[in-house]
Image (cartoon, helix red, strand yellow):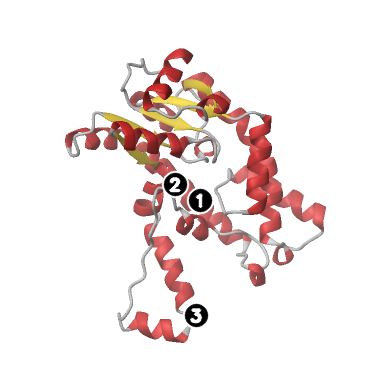
């Protein structure tokens, strides 16, 4: 683990909804930290073309839009922000019945693999952005807001894992750990608004096979939203020990219930220092 001095670069990790982006935004707005969002980097640098091509593919199904596109009369682009990653999640899609917005499972896997490659590249760009933040933009303080799926693209038990080694050499890795009540809240929130996301492929194939067996559905009969709701409940239990292994071997752990109380950069840094 990198020796920490107050103000050194930090990378926050944890499930979606534990407060990573809130903390990063607070540090940016209140204390001039450079906010490097992995999901934003994925969507705007490494998967932007695939996302926009998918928009165009859908648009060409409408004769009017097709003609306008072919004549260069309209321009289609993605408008991803730190707080709105819908273009990225929409591209990932959901497997299942095409009449309900689903895509073939093989295509789903292909897009998942695209995301994995993009996420690894975005994480490996962290040292570059630590330097760019300082030399180009004049930021002395830096926070990396990792995506909720970072634990799916690394091996926390491998001391030579390239991504974790690169990230930990640049930043202090801070895992924001939710408890059982937080996990239940995440499940409830996801149940209300199920969104596409990235999964470890081995885990995903296992969950998909179990779902088909349990429901008796064929691939084209699967309700996409029902499947990802069903899979998300298992995903939380799958990810929690992987995150903890990352923190135990490469960083530190903060309780989400403590992070929720933090409302100033100083309070957050105090919390980190008490955990070291």
| Residue positioned 44% across, 53% down in the render | 84
Residue 193: x and y in percent read 62, 54
How many numbered discs sit on the rendered protein? Answer: 3
Position of residue 54 relative to residue 118, above or below, is below
Name the element at disc 3.
loop
Q: Quadrant of residue 173?
A: top left
Q: Quadrant of residue 217?
A: bottom right
Near-viewer residue (64 or 275):
275
- Using a 10 Å C-alpha cutoff, classify the residue at mark 2 as few (fewer than 14 neighbours), some (14 to 19) or many (20 or more): some
Asked if disc 2 and disc 3 are in contact, CB closer than 8 Å, the reply is no
Position of residue 34 relative to residue 97, above or below, is above
Which label belongs to residue 41? none
Position of residue 162 relative to residue 64, above or below, is above
Image quadrant occupied by the C terminus: top left
From mark 1 to mark 2, how far is it between C-alphas?
A: 6 Å
- Using a 10 Å C-alpha cutoff, classify the residue at mark 3 as few (fewer than 14 neighbours), some (14 to 19) or many (20 or more): few
| Residue positioned 63% across, 60% down in the render | 95
Q: Dot 1 corresponds to which residue?
A: 113
Q: Dot 2 corresponds to which residue?
A: 117
| Residue positioned 31% across, 84% down in the render | 71
Asked if disc 1 and disc 2 are in contact, CB closer than 8 Å, the reply is yes
From mark 2 to mark 3, how far is it between C-alphas?
A: 29 Å
Mark with earlier residue (2, 3): 3
Name the element at disc 2.
helix
Position of residue 262 relative to residue 110, above or below, is above
Residue 182 visible? The answer is yes
Q: Dot 3 corresponds to which residue?
A: 61
Name the element at disc 1.
helix
Mark with earlier residue (1, 3): 3
């Amino acid at each position: 683990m990198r020796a920490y001095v107050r103000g050194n670069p930090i990378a926050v990790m944890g499930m979606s909804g534990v407060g990573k982006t809130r903390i990063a935004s607070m540090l940016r707005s209140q204390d001039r930290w450079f906010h490097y969002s992995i999901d934003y980097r994925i969507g705007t640098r490494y998967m932007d073309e695939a996302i926009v091509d998918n928009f165009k593919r859908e648009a060409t199904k409408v004769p009017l839009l097709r003609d306008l596109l072919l004549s260069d009369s309209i321009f289609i682009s993605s408008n991803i922000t730190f707080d709105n990653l819908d273009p990225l999640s929409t591209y990932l899609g959901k497997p299942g019945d095409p009449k309900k917005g689903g895509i073939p499972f093989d295509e789903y896997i292909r897009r998942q693999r695209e995301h994995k490659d993009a996420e690894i590249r975005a994480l490996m760009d962290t040292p570059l952005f630590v330097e760019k933040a300082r030399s180009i933009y004049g930021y002395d303080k830096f926070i990396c807001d990792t995506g909720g799926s970072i634990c799916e693209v690394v091996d926390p038990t491998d001391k030579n894992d390239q991504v974790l080694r690169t990230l930990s050499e640049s930043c202090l890795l801070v895992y924001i750990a939710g408890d059982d009540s937080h996990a239940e809240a995440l499940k409830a929130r996801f149940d209300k608004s199920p969104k596409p996301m990235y999964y470890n492929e081995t885990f995903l194939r296992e969950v998909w096979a179990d779902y088909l067996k349990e429901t008796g559905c064929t691939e084209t009969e699967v309700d996409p939203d029902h499947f990802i709701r069903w899979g998300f409940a298992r995903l939380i239990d799958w990810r929690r020990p992987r995150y903890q292994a990352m923190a135990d071997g490469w960083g530190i752990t903060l309780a989400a219930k403590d992070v929720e109380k933090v409302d100033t950069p100083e309070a957050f840094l105090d919390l980190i220092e008490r955990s070291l």
